[in-house]
Amino acid sequence: MINFDFRPERYFDGTGPNAMLVKLLYPESQWGEEISIYANVMDGTYYFEAVDFYGNEINLNPASSKLPLTLQEIIIMIETMDINPEQAQGNIALTLSGIPEAESSVYPDLEAYFSEKRKTYGLR
């Protein structure tokens, strides 16, 4: 059973000022798009950033937080990512409309959540 209330104690392992939280792969996209979500910390606040191959400015909600996000909050963040269509590079709007495969060493149940969701919609 997936624990949607799971909240990691911390994001950082002491090896640097940022941490990759999630790697998303969209296998149905023409180019096999990937988006990575990172956390940076400044003055006790976590700031989140999504990075793709094209350098699109992907809007995240929340963009920052005083605490590490719960699994439910990170899922909502992923499912509500959006971009300004006038500034979009590549086919990011179509990519974001898909259901990703997810990898995360910080949120162990994230992969299972998206795997189940993909199966529900007939994706493998």
Image: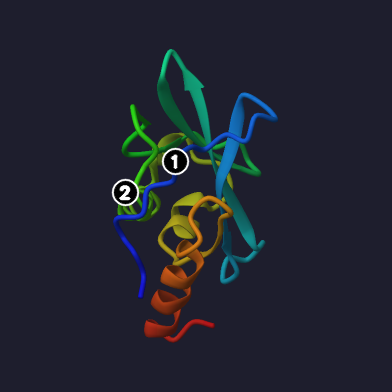
Residue 12 image-quadrant placement = top right
- What separation in Å lies between label 2 and label 1 (alpha carbons)? 15 Å
For badge 2, the amino acid type reads: Glu
Can you name the residue that lies furthest to the right here? 15
**Percent from the top left, x then y, of residue 54?**
63, 41
User: Is 28 located above or below residue 103 in the figure?
Assistant: below
Secondary element under disc 1, as helix, strand or loop, is loop
User: Is 31 located above or below residue 85 in the figure?
Assistant: below
Reading the image, the residue beneath label 2 is 73
At label 1, counting other C-alpha atoms closer than 10 Å, the crowd grade (few under 14, some 14-19, many 20 or more) is: few
User: Is 34 located above or below residue 68 in the figure?
Assistant: below
**Percent from the top left, x then y, of residue 116?**
42, 78
Disc 2 versus disc 1: nearer the observer: 1
In this view of the protein, which residue sits in the foreground, 42 or 14?
A: 14
Q: Earlier in the sequence, mark 2 or mark 1?
A: 1
**Percent from the top left, x then y, of residue 7?**
37, 48
For badge 1, the amino acid type reads: Glu
Residue 103 image-quadrant placement = bottom right
**What residue is shown at x 35% (from left), y 33% (from top)?**
67
User: Is 54 located above or below residue 100 in the figure?
Assistant: above
* Residue 9 numbered tag: 1
Q: Which quarter of the rendering shows the N terminus? A: bottom left
**Percent from the top left, x then y, of residue 13?**
62, 35
Q: Is residue 60 left or right of residue 13?
A: left
**What residue is shown at x 36% (from left), y 70% (from top)?**
2
Q: Which quarter of the rendering shows the C terminus? A: bottom right
At label 2, counting other C-alpha atoms closer than 10 Å, the crowd grade (few under 14, some 14-19, many 20 or more) is: some
Can you name the residue that lies furthest to the top here? 43
